[in-house]
């Protein structure tokens, strides 16, 4: 979720008095960090994933399922090994927005050897088991992107009713008790984003029009709803969803900027390939991804700003960072001149200065009184305050103060997958793609406006098969700048005149000394993604849609009843043991060669 400072949270009225102070000092902190670390060289590849989970409670007698609000109870137990044995802990745990959510990461970063890729799935399985062991028999930790009936009456356990007249979100659907209570950041963000924009959140998602869906689709007693839309009115409907992210350490700042630029056009492709969020508030929607829902859930712009600033603070990247890609920055970049001038005066090059200044068009929306006054030569909290609340598809991350961590890049668009096998496949593919980009000096860059177009297309129903995306025609020749519309299958598997990303990864693996077990695992991962691109296997979104719309209790009215929700989530819970051909094809993840640890001979 970002920076988790401790202290006494300020209201928006209090925070906005310090906004200029936070931003001007945040700029100075970045300048100081840049000069302290810009010449840092030789960091090896280290990387890690973040998987977010939802805790669900099943009632087998009534065939109902609710989100279980026990994250605050579980996290102290899950985190205790960090303090007892920080050098050997296998997983790290953090809170997320929902009181029903937890985030797990590997205990230590993975490295550059191929064998590290074979540890990922085993570590994910270990994380899931670690959390599951703390739950009663009728509860499960699931890696689902969204709880299908989130915001429906009685969706929490214990049951809490919304209080729209007094809650921090003013939501008619999402009670404050569903927000994680163990850190003030989450309720503070909720209240301050609503206060800054001047009204409560307004998310409208198109309903899937089935045979018996009312036309127009209108909900009685919900005047804010637009016709044929699913209406949501709280930050929790976006930030209460789960995602899959991966962060890489680069060898220096230039490599980090290169990876940031080259991965940016891949974000929409991977979003479409990992689509997993077709349901909202107990209805079947006509979109497959959560991205725009999250963007709307934290949109703090007041009405006049929505004309000048076209995007929410949660959205796609607006510019490339490297000078060689300047011509592809075809969207006017908005920034405050004083911030840009200060960065230039501080010795930051023009392209990076524009990037940072653009981030700082946003006000702080979470501030703690104890963090107002800082030492800009040592601290970075004011910079991170703004940086961590710009939730974009990619994040360029300077090294933390007084840390051994180097320059990093975070890849953020992917939807969390239903199984550890799928999550590991996505993560390992992205990691391998970074090695291919650097080894073969590939270029994926296209105009940033086309990346934005792709992001919109990627969220449409079954976009992975039915839509085409702008992509560079020749990724091996920087002089050939042409691009055209391609299917995800063509991008991933290739076509005449275009090699395809998966064959390039295969070539890279064939050129390396990869042990047999790791090679077996990676080939299964690549096979899964290849066949998902062709349509031989389904995305999670398509599989869940089919499950719901063919359920015996479904009335072809776009409604996900308690019974349907119960059966769907029970089936998802059985996926690790009862494989699904439509999701995985003939791959049996129980026969994976994934291993718990890297052999000692490779770590010494």
Image: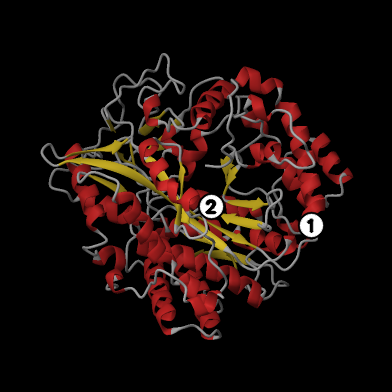
Q: In terms of sequence position, does the residue under pointer 2 or pointer 1 come before the other?
A: 1
Q: Residue 332: x, y in percent?
A: 72, 44
Q: What element carries label 1?
A: loop
Is residue 246 at all visible to an observer of this figure? yes
Going by the image, does 415 lie left or right of 433? left
User: Seen from this angle, which residue lies furthest top?
Assistant: 165
Quadrant of residue 365 within the rendered picture? top right
Residue carrying label 2: 412
Which residue shows up at 53% across the image and 34% down it? Answer: 298
Going by the image, does 13 lie left or right of 321? left
Q: Residue 600: x, y in percent?
A: 49, 76
21 or 332: nearer the viewer: 21
Going by the image, does 8 lie left or right of 492? right
CA neighbours of label 1 inside 10 A, class few (<14), some (14 to 19), many (20+): some
Residue carrying label 1: 38
Which residue shows up at 43% across the image and 15% down it? Answer: 166
Query: Looking at the image, is 242 positioned above or below residue 484?
Result: above
Quadrant of residue 385 within the rendered picture? top right
Which residue shows up at 27% across the image and 27% down it? Answer: 159
421 or 148: nearer the viewer: 421
CA neighbours of label 2 inside 10 A, class few (<14), some (14 to 19), many (20+): many
Query: Looking at the image, is 316 positioned above or below residue 404?
Result: above
């Amino acid at each position: 979720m970002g920076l988790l400072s401790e202290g006494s949270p300020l209201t928006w009225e209090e925070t906005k008095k310090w906004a200029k102070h936070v931003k001007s000092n945040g700029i100075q902190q970045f300048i100081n960090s840049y000069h302290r670390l810009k010449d840092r060289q030789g960091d090896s590849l280290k990387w890690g994933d973040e998987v977010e989970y939802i805790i669900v409670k099943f009632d087998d007698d009534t065939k109902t399922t609710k989100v279980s609000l026990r994250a605050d109870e579980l996290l102290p137990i899950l985190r205790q090994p960090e303090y007892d044995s920080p050098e050997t802990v296998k997983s790290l745990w953090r809170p997320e927005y929902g009181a029903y959510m937890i985030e797990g990461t590997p205990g230590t970063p993975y490295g550059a050897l191929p064998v590290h890729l074979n540890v990922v799935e085993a570590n994910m399985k270990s994380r899931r088991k670690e959390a599951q062991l703390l739950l009663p028999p009728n509860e499960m930790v699931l890696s689902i992107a969204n709880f299908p009936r989130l915001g429906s009456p009685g969706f929490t356990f214990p049951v809490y009713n919304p209080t729209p007249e007094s809650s921090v979100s003013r939501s008619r659907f999402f009670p404050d008790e569903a927000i994680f209570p163990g850190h003030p950041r989450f309720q503070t963000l909720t209240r301050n984003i609503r206060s800054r924009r001047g009204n409560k959140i307004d998310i409208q998602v198109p309903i899937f029009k089935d045979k018996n869906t009312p036309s127009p689709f209108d909900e009685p007693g919900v005047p804010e709803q637009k016709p044929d839309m699913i209406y949501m009115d709280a930050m929790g409907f976006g930030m209460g969803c789960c995602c899959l992210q991966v962060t890489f350490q680069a060898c220096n700042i230039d490599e980090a900027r290169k990876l940031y630029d080259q991965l940016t056009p891949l974000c929409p492709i991977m979003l479409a390939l990992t689509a997993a969020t077709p349901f909202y508030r107990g209805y079947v929607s006509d979109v497959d991804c959560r991205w725009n829902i999250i963007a709307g859930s934290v949109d703090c712009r007041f009405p006049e700003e929505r004309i000048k600033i076209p995007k929410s603070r949660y959205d796609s990247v607006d510019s490339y960072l490297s000078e060689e890609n300047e011509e592809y920055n075809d969207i006017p970049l908005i920034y405050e001149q004083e911030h840009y001038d200060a960065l230039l005066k501080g010795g930051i090059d023009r392209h990076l200065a524009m990037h940072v200044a653009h981030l700082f068009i946003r006000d702080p929306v979470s501030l703690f009184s104890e963090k107002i006054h800082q030492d800009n030569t040592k601290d970075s909290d004011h910079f991170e305050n703004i940086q961590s609340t710009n939730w974009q598809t990619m994040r360029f991350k300077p090294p933390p103060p007084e840390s051994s961590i180097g320059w990093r890049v975070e890849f953020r668009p992917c939807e969390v997958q239903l199984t550890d096998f799928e999550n590991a496949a996505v993560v390992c593919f992205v990691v391998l793609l970074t090695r291919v980009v650097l080894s073969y000096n590939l270029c994926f860059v296209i105009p940033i406006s086309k990346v934005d177009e792709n992001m919109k297309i990627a969220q449409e129903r079954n976009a992975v098969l039915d839509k085409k995306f702008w992509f560079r025609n020749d990724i091996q020749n920087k002089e050939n700048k042409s691009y055209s519309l391609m299917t995800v299958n063509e991008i991933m598997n290739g076509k005449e005149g275009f090699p395809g990303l998966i064959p390039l990864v295969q070539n890279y693996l064939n050129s390396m000394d990869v042990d047999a077990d790791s090679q077996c695992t990676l080939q299964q991962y690549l096979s899964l993604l290849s066949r998902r691109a062709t349509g031989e296997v389904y995305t999670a979104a398509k599989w869940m849609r089919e499950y719901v719309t063919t359920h015996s209790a479904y009335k072809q009215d776009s409604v996900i009843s308690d019974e349907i929700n119960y059966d769907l989530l029970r089936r998802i819970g059985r996926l690790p043991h009862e494989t699904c051909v439509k999701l995985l094809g003939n791959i049996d993840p129980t026969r994976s060669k994934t291993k718990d640890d890297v052999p000692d001979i490779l770590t010494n």
